[in-house]
């Protein structure tokens, strides 16, 4: 089964308006975002934690590549991905629930 088969299959019943689907979609988006922004977060953290050295982003990138290699940019990616997946799943579920509750009062 490929992604294209799943997307093009009209027999898949997935209601995006349920609390579970909102949580799952939020977790998926949060996890992807958390993983993809891990390198930028690591660079930012290194700059802030070494404030006495006044490092530029390119200095930090070169140092990480030299000391840890490309994989060094993704240290902590699992924890960060998990954190953001859970955080956005909760946020999106709460937001959508409150939005659905508030619609009758503001329309």
Image (tube, rainbow, N blue to C red):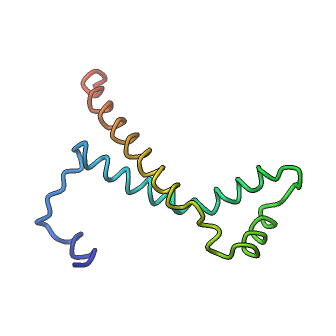
Q: Residue at x 74, y 68 (%)?
A: 61
Q: Residue at 45% across / 54% down in the picture?
A: 82
Q: Position of residue 14 (x, y in %)?
A: 18, 56
> Quadrant where the C terminus lies?
top left
Q: Position of residue 30 (x, y in %)?
A: 44, 53
Q: How many badges with numbers are in the image?
A: 0
Image quadrant occupied by the N terminus: bottom left
Q: Nearer the viewer, residue 65 or 107?
A: 65
> Is 22 positioned to the left or the right of 57 in the image?
left
Residue 3 screen position, x and y as percent: 28, 74
Q: Residue furthest top?
A: 105
Residue 66, above or below 55: below
Residue 62 sits in quarter: bottom right
Q: Is residue 29 left or right of residue 80?
A: left
Furthest residue to the bottom?
A: 1
In the image, 9: left or right of 20?
left
Residue 10 appears left or right of 105: left
Q: Quadrant of residue 65?
A: bottom right
Q: Position of residue 67 (x, y in %)?
A: 75, 73
Q: Residue at x 16, y 70 (%)?
A: 9
């Amino acid at each position: 089964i490929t992604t294209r088969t799943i997307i093009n299959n009209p027999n898949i019943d997935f209601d995006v308006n349920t609390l579970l689907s909102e949580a799952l979609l939020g977790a998926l988006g949060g996890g992807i975002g958390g993983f993809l922004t891990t390198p930028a977060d690591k660079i930012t953290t290194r700059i802030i934690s070494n404030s006495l050295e006044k490092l530029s982003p390119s200095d930090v990138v070169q140092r990480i590549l030299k000391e840890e290699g490309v994989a060094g940019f993704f240290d902590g990616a699992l924890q960060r991905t998990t954190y953001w997946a859970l955080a956005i799943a909760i946020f999106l579920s709460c937001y959508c629930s409150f939005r659905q509750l508030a619609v009758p009062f503001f329309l």
